[in-house]
Amino acid sequence: MAGFDVPGASLEVELSDEGGHPVVQLHGLTSSRARDRVLDLDLGHGLSGTRLLRYDARGHGHSRGRAVPDDYLWPNLAQDLLHVLDAWFPDEKVYGVGTSMGSGTLMHAAVADPQRFAGLTLLLPPTAWDTRVAQAEQYRRNAALIEEAGEAAFLAAGRDFPPPPAAVGHPETVPEVVEELLPSVFRGAAASDLPTPAELARIDVPVRILAWVDDPSHPMSTAQTLARVFPRATLTVAETADDVRRWPALLHEDVGRIS
């Protein structure tokens, strides 16, 4: 693992080099490389025959960041990603994998530099456009609650919401963000959205969209809209944890196809 400096942060980056096609994998909001593995969302785990690059987003996991909400806007996270790719995979087309916030980061990066990517796997795309308004307000409430009552109160409030059916059975996890940064991370997410459908329609690479049912933070409406918007999209929907456990094999197939 290596520390990699970007403006206002230092990212903890790891490369699993087995030769083959370059792949980058991004985690979701308040998660990390380690937490995604616990939640069965680390699709790159065991992905053989590739050069798999994973890193904790700024302020998450073992990466450092500042208490500045604008630092966590998705277009800024996309610039972090492009800096990482320039350092590890210069002048190569990369296959991108991202969960929730990570999928938003990938989409912004692909809009900014469409020649950078050979294909995308977007796990659990988040609320976007019309559905983003209510989610953004919830993130702002989260930030205020943490500042007023602490992280423990925020975690207690979250236990009132059952997980989606496909996520049942995993151990309880906590945010992989230190408490003093959590309000800024949530406010950055609240001020973020996916690129417009018109912008995304110009990304002409294979896109696999992986969604699951009954999750208001990752609604089927976003996944279905993305499946219509991307010129070369495939939508796969999970209803059970067993369905989710099949996702790594789909990634292996998709990366092999573009390789």
Image: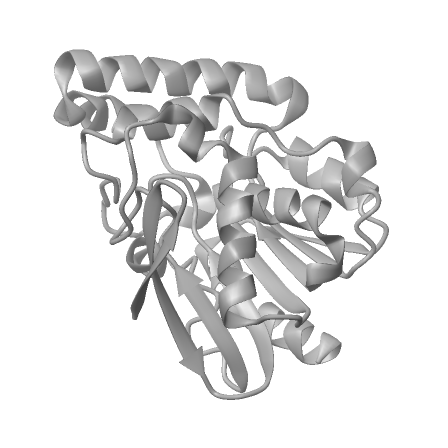
To which quarter of the image does residue 148 belong? top left
Q: Looking at this view, is 229 or 237 the one in front?
A: 229
Q: Residue at x 63, y 66 (%)?
A: 95
Q: Is residue 190 above or below residue 164?
A: above
Q: Position of residue 215 (x, y in %)?
A: 50, 34
Q: Is residue 242 above or below residue 27?
A: below
Q: Is residue 57 visible?
A: yes
Total numbered badges shown on the rendered structure: 0
The answer to whether 33 appears left or right of 127 in the picture is: left
Q: Residue at x 59, y 28 (%)?
A: 193
The quarter in which the C terminus is drawn is: bottom right
Q: Position of residue 75 (x, y in %)?
A: 57, 37
Q: Residue at x 44, y 39 (%)?
A: 164
Q: Looking at this view, is 226 or 160 the one in front?
A: 226
The answer to whether 17 appears left or right of 112 in the picture is: left
Q: Residue at x 43, y 45 (%)?
A: 28
Please name the colour scheme applied to the rendered image: one colour
Q: Position of residue 252 (x, y in %)?
A: 59, 75
The quarter in which the N terminus is drawn is: bottom left
Q: Looking at this view, is 76 or 16 the one in front?
A: 76
The answer to whether 125 appears left or right of 254 in the picture is: left
Q: Is residue 124 visible?
A: no
Q: Position of residue 53 (x, y in %)?
A: 46, 69
Q: Is residue 181 above or below residue 21?
A: above
To which quarter of the image does residue 149 belong? top left
The answer to whether 95 appears left or right of 245 in the picture is: right
